[in-house]
Amino acid sequence: MKVLVITGSMRKNGNTSILADEFIRGAKDAGHEAEKVELREKKFGDCFGCRACHKNGGTCVQKDDMADVLAKVQEADVIALASPMYYFTWTGLMKRFLDRTYPLLPLLKDKDFYLITLGGVPDKKLMANILADFNMYVGCFKEFNQVGCRNAGSIIGTAALMPGAIREFAAMQEAYETGKNLK
């Protein structure tokens, strides 16, 4: 099984990346092929909304790093979106990536999506908005294709403000176990 983790944090080796790495470690320990794409290392622009991709077989007219990332998304069986929560939703970087997956709308089938997210909030109930946004994003593929793309679950860290703080929380074990138990 191919596992792809997309991280949307601007911090190198920040809490989001640490949690994503633990998910990947679990997946690799279970014998899966796993890769992480750090969006902050990629050069890509906003979606133009031109819909040319839906007329030409799913190829975006922009020539940037997103072509490679979208190919990896298509090849993956499991896609984990890892983003810290900013103002109760995705980072701008992750949202830009999500918008750029528009060419894949008619193409993605039979994928399991996971959300890996954390924030400085003290309670998981304050993560409701990002969870709803994630569910709606995955729902777009399900609605369009009527098959196969699933919200397979989420890993949520809270109260992780300081760099590396996530290492002390239960979300680390949850991330590892979720990765290890992918089917």
Image (cartoon, rainbow, N blue to C red):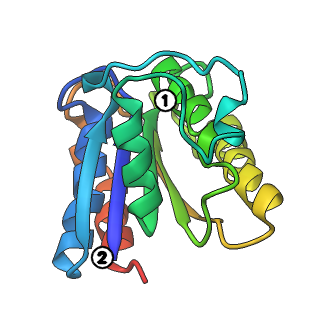
Judge depth for marks 2 and 1 and give the one in front.
1
Is the C terminus in the top left, top right, bottom left or bottom right quadrant? bottom left
Location of residue 12 in the rendering, given as x and y in whole percent from the top left corner: 19, 26
Height in image: 145 above or below 100? below
Residue at 23 percent across and 81 percent down: it is: 30
Q: Is disc 2 surrounded by few (<14), some (14 to 19) or many (20+) residues within 10 Å? A: many
Give the label on residue 55, or none.
none
Asked where in the image residue 17 lies, by quadrant, the reply is top left
Q: Which residue is disc 1 drawn over? A: 94
Residue at 54 percent across and 32 percent down: it is: 60
Q: CA distance from mark 2 to mark 1?
A: 25 Å
On the question of residue 166 being in view, the answer is: no
Asked where in the image residue 23 lies, by quadrant, the reply is bottom left
On the question of residue 97 being in view, the answer is: yes
Q: Amino acid at mark 2?
A: Lys
Residue at 82 percent across and 58 percent down: it is: 143
SS at badge 2: helix
